[in-house]
Image: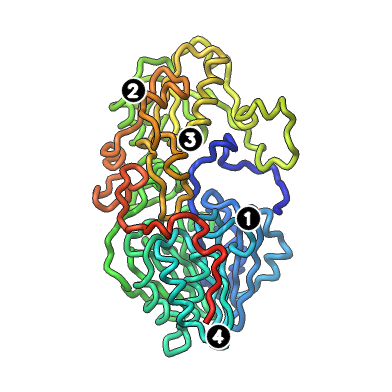
């Protein structure tokens, strides 16, 4: 169990946790650099994408060493552990579980070794034909027992098991990946080469950066910035990259059919990240402007739910002409609680992390802007807090359409029954959270704000149209637990 460190988590209300992305991936090939520390700082930039476990694998050209544990990046690594990871290539990962329980055995990078080659792999996303791939693994196994408890385990085993012949890991990946369906942005390595691959839909982001003497691949451009790498380009959907002393080699293993996750634009990625050539802060401000046009309010002040609602609140204020202000203060030092709160403290709930500015709120009509509503408990608590300190009216504005459908491509969304918009109308949700009015940005308005082609985005959590079919048997994080493949 990870030691508590008082760091802030995303959760304002433990009973209403926000959507969680599967993880963040980072890889670096740079001879002569301290690649373990580069990977450590890269993971820091991606910590928001996964807070259950963290790991780094490093190769010195002869062997791969892996260090991974449950917990935040700063909990898992210290100076001695990083100093012990010496080499020229590193693969790093921070995880939220989507397939496979949140236990040490499922922490990444995964690692497999054969007499021919070793492989460390980090995966962002969620596969939708895991059982089919596991059956292939059982058929290919030469003997013994292979336990697979996550889709990433299966993928790692398949690649390393097919890397015996000429071309090694690169050729094995090129043969296996066309058979893999679902969402996967991968960063993996053998003893001498760093690899990156992205599924044909490009559900999850993956970018390539240049160091003075090497290369970096990462889930977001913000991770390139923190290690001083210059952005080169996005890894294309259906592309496999190989990076070593020969430079960067690219091959297409499947025709691109882009369906980039629309929720990356709303919430998942950092606001200082660029996707599709545009910074997400600018996109989220534009979403707020759109929201103001679609759902105006007569009010005295626009405030965000910090920090996720801040860019959209800025845009809403700009477009509406209503002044923008700070009405809620976030306590940045309340995080993973290790002391059971008393009944009195437990009843305070969200006040552990948010507190209203009474002098700003009292007597005013407030527009409060947030990025999304999942279960609705957080918004209900915020509206109640604002009324308690004297708000005359509370108008809630949401910078995404109603989230009605679960995600099977790498976001740990609840089942549809647990999604408040999957069961209730907007008017019913408004009444449940106690707001004077509730407005969501339209799906068309959100798509227009991204400046991307409408057909190039995955909108399944909003409209239920899944770009890659998801069999019933592949739904849920425990599809392989306990599954043991035997020859």
Q: Secondary structure at mark 2?
A: helix
* Residues tagged 2 and 4 counted as in contact (Cβ below 8 A): no
Give the mark toward the camera: 2 or 3: 3
Closer to the camera, 306 or 51?
Answer: 51
Residue 337 percent across, percent down from the top left: 69, 40
| Residue shown at the point (60%, 65%) measured from the top left | 56
Give the mark toward the camera: 1 or 2: 1
Mark 4–mark 3 distance (CA, rounded to whole Å): 47 Å
Badge 2 density bin: few <14, some 14–19, many ≥20, Cα 10 Å: many
Give the mark toward the camera: 1 or 4: 4
Badge 3 density bin: few <14, some 14–19, many ≥20, Cα 10 Å: many
Q: Secondary structure at mark 1?
A: helix
Q: Which residue is mark 4?
A: 143
| Residue shown at the point (38%, 61%) measured from the top left | 182
- Residue 63 visible in the picture: yes
Marks 1 and 2, the one that precedes in the sequence: 1
Closer to the camera, 95 or 248?
Answer: 95
* Residues tagged 1 and 4 counted as in contact (Cβ below 8 A): no
Name the mark on residue 375.
3
Marks 1 and 3, the one that precedes in the sequence: 1
Marks 2 and 4, the one that precedes in the sequence: 4
Is residue 223 found left or right of 455 in the rendered image? Answer: right
């Amino acid at each position: 169990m990870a030691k508590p460190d008082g760091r802030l988590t995303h959760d304002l209300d433990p009973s209403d946790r926000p959507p969680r992305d599967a993880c963040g991936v980072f890889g670096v090939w740079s001879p002569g650099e301290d690649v373990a520390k580069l990977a450590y700082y890269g993971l820091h930039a991606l910590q928001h994408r996964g807070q259950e476990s963290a790991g780094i694998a490093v190769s010195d050209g002869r062997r791969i060493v892996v260090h991974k544990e449950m917990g935040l990046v700063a909990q898992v690594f210290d100076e001695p552990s990083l100093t012990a990871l010496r080499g020229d290539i590193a693969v790093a990962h921070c995880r939220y579980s989507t397939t496979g329980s949140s236990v040490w055995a499922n922490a990444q990078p995964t690692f497999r070794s054969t007499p021919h080659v070793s492989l460390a792999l980090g995966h962002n996303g969620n596969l939708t034909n895991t059982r089919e791939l596991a059956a292939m693994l059982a058929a290919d196994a030469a003997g013994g027992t292979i336990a697979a408890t996550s889709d990433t385990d299966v993928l790692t085993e398949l690649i390393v098991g097919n890397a015996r012949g000429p071309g090694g890991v690169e050729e094995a990946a090129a043969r296996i990946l066309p058979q893999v369906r679902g969402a996967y942005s991968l960063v993996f390595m053998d003893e001498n080469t760093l690899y990156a691959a992205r599924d044909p839909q490009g559900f999850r982001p993956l970018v390539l950066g240049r160091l003075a003497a090497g290369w970096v691949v990462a889930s977001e451009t913000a991770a390139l910035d923190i290690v001083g790498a210059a952005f080169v380009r996005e890894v294309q959907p259906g592309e496999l990259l190989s990076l070593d002393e020969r430079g960067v080699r690219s091959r297409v293993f499947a025709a691109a059919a882009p369906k980039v996750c629309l929720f990356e634009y709303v919430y998942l990625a950092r606001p200082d990240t660029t996707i599709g050539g545009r910074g997400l802060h600018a996109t989220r401000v534009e979403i707020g402007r759109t929201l103001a046009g679609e759902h105006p309010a007569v009010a005295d002040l626009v405030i965000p739910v910090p920090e996720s609602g801040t860019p959209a609140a800025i845009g809403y204020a700009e477009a509406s002409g209503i002044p923008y202000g700070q009405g809620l203060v976030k306590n940045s030092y309340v995080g993973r609680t290790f002391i059971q709160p008393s009944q009195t403290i437990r009843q305070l709930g969200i006040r552990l992390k948010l507190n209203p500015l009474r002098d700003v709120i009292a007597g005013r009509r407030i527009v409060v802007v947030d990025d999304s509503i999942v279960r609705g408990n957080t918004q209900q608590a915020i509206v109640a807090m604002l009324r308690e300190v004297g708000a005359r009216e509370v108008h809630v504005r949401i910078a995404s359409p109603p989230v009605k459908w679960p995600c099977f491509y790498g976001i740990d969304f609840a089942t549809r029954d647990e999604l408040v918009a999957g069961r209730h109308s907007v008017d019913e949700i408004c009444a449940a959270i106690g707001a004077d009015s509730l407005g969501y940005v339209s799906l068309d308005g959100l798509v227009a704000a991204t400046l991307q082609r409408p057909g190039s985005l995955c909108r399944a959590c909003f409209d239920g149209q899944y770009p890659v079919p998801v069999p019933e048997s592949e739904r849920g994080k425990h599809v392989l637990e306990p599954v043991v493949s035997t020859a």
